Image: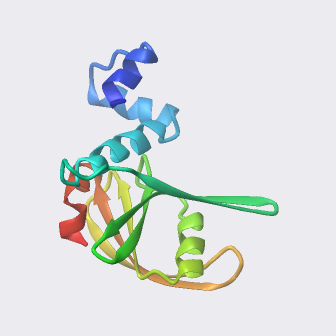
Amino acid sequence: MDTGLVSALMQIILKTPAEIHELIRINSGGISEQAAGQLLRTIYMKFIDPNLHYYIREARGSEAEIDYLIQVKTDIIPIEVKSGAAGSLKSLHQFMYERNFKKAVRINSEKPELIGVDVKTSKGQNSKYSLISIPFYLTEEIERLL
């Protein structure tokens, strides 16, 4: 389903960019994740089934989620989608530590940037990786940017 159909089902009529921003905020990013997923599906050639994958780790007393996982050449790339500029990346930090991956992507509403992440996870482990932060409109260019 695309964002227009989702909005229609919710009986939402959006007339201005401010209303769209408010919708994203109200839905705690659910529309943002859906829009990013829709864009990620367009990356692949038409004859390849564009399946999207995610990751959920359930541990005693906590749950961690990675919004999307994609394969670029031989690398698995985790993707976090944030509806605004801010947002915790605790699940991503833990995932990157556990899997020892070196690249991750954040899709949000900010300008593109490459960040060297060197943080401690919520369990105190060092997590070090490169985070490519891109705005929604560059989602289709994710493979080129990586």
Is 6 situated left or right of 110 in this image?
A: right
- The image position of residue 18, as x and y in percent, is 33, 30
Name the residue located 51 percent from the left edge and 84 percent from the top edge: 100
**Placement of 143 over or under 102, stated as above or below:** above
Is 62 situated left or right of 64 in this image?
A: right
Q: Quadrant of residue 113?
A: bottom left
Name the colour scheme.
rainbow
Residue 1 or 124: which is nearer the viewer? 1
**Placement of 21 over or under 139, stated as above or below:** above
Q: Quadrant of the C terminus?
A: bottom left
Q: Quadrant of residue 64?
A: bottom right
Q: Residue furthest right?
A: 60
- The image position of residue 120, as x and y in percent, is 61, 81
Q: Residue furthest front?
A: 47
Name the residue located 25 percent from the left edge and 53 percent from the top edge: 48
- The image position of residue 91, as x and y in percent, is 59, 65
Q: Quadrant of the N terminus?
A: top left
Let me know if residue 95 appears in the view. yes
- The image position of residue 130, as x and y in percent, is 38, 79
Name the residue located 27 percent from the left edge and 74 percent from the top edge: 73
Let me know if residue 66 appears in the view. no
Name the residue located 38 percent from the left edge and 50 percent from the top edge: 51
Q: Total marks drawn?
A: 0
Residue 15 or 34: which is nearer the viewer? 34
Is 66 situated left or right of 57 in this image?
A: left
